[in-house]
Each structure stands twice: as structure tokens, then as C-alpha cells.
Amino acid sequence: MYKVKVYVTLRESVLDPQGSAVKSALHSMDYKEVQDVRIGKYMELTIEKSDRDLDTAVREMCEKLLANTVIEDFSYEVQEVVTK
Amino acid sequence: MYKVKVYVTLRESVLDPQGSAVKSALHSMDYKEVQDVRIGKYMELTIEKSDRDLDTAVREMCEKLLANTVIEDFSYEVQEVVTK
């Protein structure tokens, strides 16, 4: 069994109004040292072993469903879960 | 300057309807090996050096604004950015 951690972030060139709102909120709470906030998604998938190549499958899932590759980048980490 | 990566996840005991929807979508796309999906938030903060202790400040920001600690857990990583 694998645990896959997927990180989806807006591309550099894309405006992030949600991030700007959080930054303003932090400034109003007196955390003036915060220069920038970018908000993305974090997903944890639990995937069973299968015949399919895990790396290819995860990349396909990201490209087809989890990320909008026009405006978002994604990256992921795979951890094998050993159950006894 | 520091780059702080914040991960906010729903607590284990809290239902995640968004994750269930994504799991169903992946199953309908024939990725039946996906057993579970949990969705969280990923935030990147760029923070200037200040007199305040960074670790304390980030923990406070998470507790007060970025995470709802009743139903969410948070963790974070700090990277120092060296500009020349």
C-alpha cells in the first residue's frame, strides 16, 4: 500500500486572490513581516498495489483530475506503507 | 527571508466529503486502486526577518487564522531563503 502526497499550487504568473486576502488578514493581525501568501491544495491518496505503474498512474490522475495544468503546477511524494 | 510551507489537514475523525467525491471520480476513471483520498490545504508564506521568533509567529498564525484547530491539524516547514 502506498501513501501519495500531492501538492497542487497556482503557477507563478497566476494571480492568487485568496492568498492576497489571507495576507491582508495577517497584516491586520499585526504580522506585517508576511510578504506574500500563496494558497494551494494538499491531497493524501491511499493507493493499493496494482499491476499499473504507480508513478504513471499518479501523474495521470494529477493531469486529468487533481490539477488544472493550465494554471496549476503539481508535485507529489510517494511513501510505501508497510503493514505487518 | 524565509519561505514557510504550511500543511492543513482535516483530523482523522472528521468526514471529508470533498475527498470522497474525488475518490468516486477517480474510481469512475478506472483508478480502482485508490482506497482513500483526504483533501487539505497547502500554503506558502514568504516572511521577512523580524525581531519576533519565527516559530512562535507561524504557530500563532496557524492557530488564529490558517487552520481551524477544532477540526483541522497543521504542520509546517521553514526554509531560509538566501538572496545574494
Image (cartoon, coloured by chain):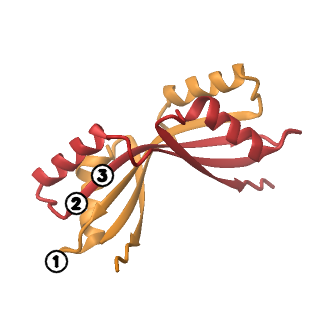
Chain colours: A red, B orange
Q: Residue furthest right?
A: A51
The relative height of residue B48 versus residue A35 in the rendered view (above or below) is below
Residue farthest to the top, as pictured: B28
Chain identifier of the residue bearing label 2 in the image: A
Tag 3's secondary structure?
A: strand
Judge from the rendering whether residue B27 lies leftward or rightward of residue B51; answer left or right.
right
Amino acid type at circle 1 is: Asp
Residue depicted at x 70% and y 36%: A60
- Residue A79 quadrant: bottom right
Circles 3 and 2 on the same subunit: yes
Identify the residue at horizontal 24%, vertical 47% (top origin). B65
Q: Circle 1: is it few (<14), some (14-19), or many (20+) Cα within 10 Å?
A: few
Q: Residues within 10 Å of mark 3 (few under 14, many from 20)?
A: many
Q: Which residue is mark 1?
A: B51
The answer to whether residue B23 is above or below residue B7 is above
* Percent coordinates x, y for residue B1 in the rendering: 30, 72
Q: Which amino acid, by three-letter code, is at mark 2?
A: Val
Q: Residue furthest bottom?
A: B84
CA gap between label 3 and label 1 equals 20 Å
Tell us which disc is closer to us: 3 or 1: 3
Task: Give whichever of B68, A65 is nearer the camera.
Answer: A65
Disc 3 designates what residue? A37
Q: CA distance from mark 3 to mark 2?
A: 8 Å
Figure check: B75 above or below A49: below
Distance, label 2 to label 1, CA atoms, is: 13 Å
